[in-house]
Amino acid sequence: MQILDGNRAAAQGAKLARVQVIAAYPITPQTPVTESLSEFVEGGELSAEYIAVEGEHSALAVCASASMVGARTFTGTSSHGLAYMHEMLHWTAGARLPVVLACVNRAIGAPWSILNDQQDSISQRDTGWIQTYARNNQEILDSIIQAYRIAETVYVPVMVCYDGYILSHTEMPVDVPSQEAVDRFLPAYRPHTILDPATPKNYNLVTLANPRLNTDGILCHGYMELRYLLQEALQNSRETITKVGQEFGKQFGRDYSNMLWEDKLDDADIVIVAMGSLAMEAIVAADMLREEGHKVGVLGLRVFRPFPKSGVVEALQNARLVLVFDKNISYGLEGATCSEIKSALYGQRVNPVVRNFIVGLGGRDVKAGELAAAVNRSLPLLKEGALNAEYPEWVCHI
Amino acid sequence: MRTRDCQHICDESSPGIGEAGRTGEWRNSFPVIDQTKCIPVRQSKASCFLCWLYCPDAVISKTIPVQINLEYCKGCGICAQICPAQAITMVDEAEFCSEQDS
Amino acid sequence: MLKTSAVNLTEKEYLLPGNRTCPGCALSLAYRHILKALEGQVIVTVPASCLTVLHGMYPVTSVIVPCVNTPFASTAASATGLVAGLKVLEKKGLTVLAIAGDGGTHDIGIQALSGAAERQTDFLYICYDNEGYMNTGNQRSSSTPLGAISGTTPILGKQQNQKDITAIMEAHGIPYVATANASYPLDLYEKVRKARLVKGTRFIHVYTPCPPGWHFPFSDTVRIGELAVQTGWVILYEVENGIFRLTSASESIARRGSLKPAKEYFAGQGRFQNITEEQIDEMQDWINARWKHCLERATNS
């Protein structure tokens, strides 16, 4: 057991996973991750190539190509850094490369902020990466180790997200597994790409809209079929994520077979939905509300991509009121997780009122009491015939 | 037509001749070598081969006599321009075809 | 060691006929010889460029070497990743070849290239320079010459002269920097062969005239390239660990000739149809100054 902040937990996870190529650019609040890793490498604790790239776009380009050669790769970033590598996020997923990226969630400017919210990774949800959100530092370390197992099985890159400062800079007890145990859990990476002059192949060339015959007369995919395969891989990854999580539980004693965190849902008719560290705060709020006599439960989205649709439907089947707290917003509409919760419920004969709250942007502190107050304000929505509001409510000082 | 038989999960291409099709169909004129002027032919030994060296498309063989793969030759005319013995002439395809017809 | 000639140069090709380049493409000519010099023992990485098109379209490629395509700005970063991956996996004997156009080198790719060079990344970077974004139909790049018409300088022509990328790379203190020209394939071949054996970042700037982009008949490609050297627009040189040396035709001209007037070079290309007398004079002065500087360097080395 060690006392580690989230960044050091992430670095430990990467180290235990025996990553071979690390390319990262410092950005607040991720910087200690890359510093820890460079310390491990220079100190001889981790046998890896550490590349001090000149920018985040290059960071992911380095990882993608190193992954194609057959090396296990790692990068980490936040906010503007993640935005800067946006093009490469699409590329890495489309090229089906099992890169693991730690995203230390931070607000994006303008206005400039170095503090936490989840807009950065949420903005990248369309790129084809598996996305997980950690609630605490133990989950950060565990998620990184599992990420390699998952990524290298389904050949989809994984983004392990955790809240900047709230987790990244807060120390918590973390059980750090032994190297031997992790070695047993993580087999060596076998790339699907071959870069060998003896059997020359050319990767990620221009691909036409329609299928085209190869030199053996086989009809090969068009762009759309290759993209279909990525979606299929993400859909099928739910099974892998569950299995890996179960195996992790058997070996390390912490089970991750559920893509969701569920707290007190059995008898709840009001459910709070949150992601990341906010899900822990929500549990405190739920306890407060229970003391006031309300039957409140918490649904945490541990895995955000692939979206755990059927799990959400099942978890919310008895809910009459769902309050989704988003530390992000898709401007012009509403919080992203709220939209996706609604999309999961639609047409499934599970029809609670869904209320969206935008909280915590730019590092605005979110206290359990505020969450509880938001729930209390929403109680009139339990009445028969209540409708979803058009736009989310913001918990701020406007 | 379905593409499942294609085992690729990403776009992985393998080498093949004529990737752009029969590029010989692009040209307006084609090179003809006068073997009486061609230096390696005249000398009966490996020499010159500048046409081979300068061909952007690698359709000229380094043999005696030198041969040009007209299936893929794009008719750029660099070989004709570079030949130190002026042994190569670019013959207009349309003229050639009408001569053949008549 | 026998000097390379067309006669003794290997017949083995790494480029297959029937690729998508234009007739008379200097890039195709240059690439043929680059790959010969490396004996195909490479992993190539390539950004958006004419070279991507030469490489083909999925699922068929026209080259017989392993290759990784990468987004436009990231060529040198991709190469860095390949080098790092090969190193950790202890795979030896392969050259990582990053090859990009002037757009992908001077402009959008310069940050990654500078970073890779500063980190002393062990790879060979070749910039093939057709002085514009030719793959997308000729838009100006920072390598486009003064006065040249392009898609984005359609009436007034480019108002600035080109960026000297070779000097920029030399300033990084890398062990090998050279210029080359598709019209002098044996000089290019020798330079690539030499660069292959050097450890650290190696940069070769290859001049590759573009018939459709520069508006000249495609049979003239080699002749235009030769004229570039004869007028001093292109100077063939190499700098090996700081030692400067003129090579090939530039070396001959320095020894026993003088440069032809620049306007002979501009005359054969439609992209210079609007160039003004003032611009020609400016270019001639620039060429003269650069040539003088090279002669001084050659004498002092």
Image (cartoon, helix red, strand yellow):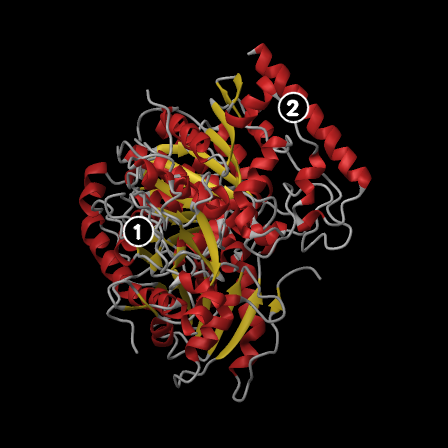
Residue drawn 34% across the image and 51% down it:
C16
Q: Which mark is residue A117?
A: none
Q: Are marks 1 and 2 in contact (CB under 8 Å)?
A: no
Q: Position of residue A308 (x, y in %)?
A: 36, 68
Res C258 label: 2
Give whichever of B38, B82 is nearer the camera: B38
Q: Is residue C252 visible?
A: yes
Residue where numbered disc 1 is placed: A201
Q: Relative to A44, is A173 above or below?
A: below
Q: Amino acid at mark 1?
A: Lys
Q: CA distance from mark 1 to mark 2?
A: 47 Å
Chain to which mark 1 belongs: A
Q: Position of residue B6 (x, y in %)?
A: 26, 66
- A89 left or right of A226? right
**Is the residue marked by circle 2 packed among few (<14), some (14-19), or many (20+) residues within 10 Å?**
few
The residue lying furthest to the right in this view is: C278
Query: Label 2 marks which chain's residue?
Result: C
**Amino acid beneath label 2:** Ser
In the picture, measured across the screen, residue C140 lies left or right of residue A315, that is right
**Foreground mark, 1 or 2?**
2
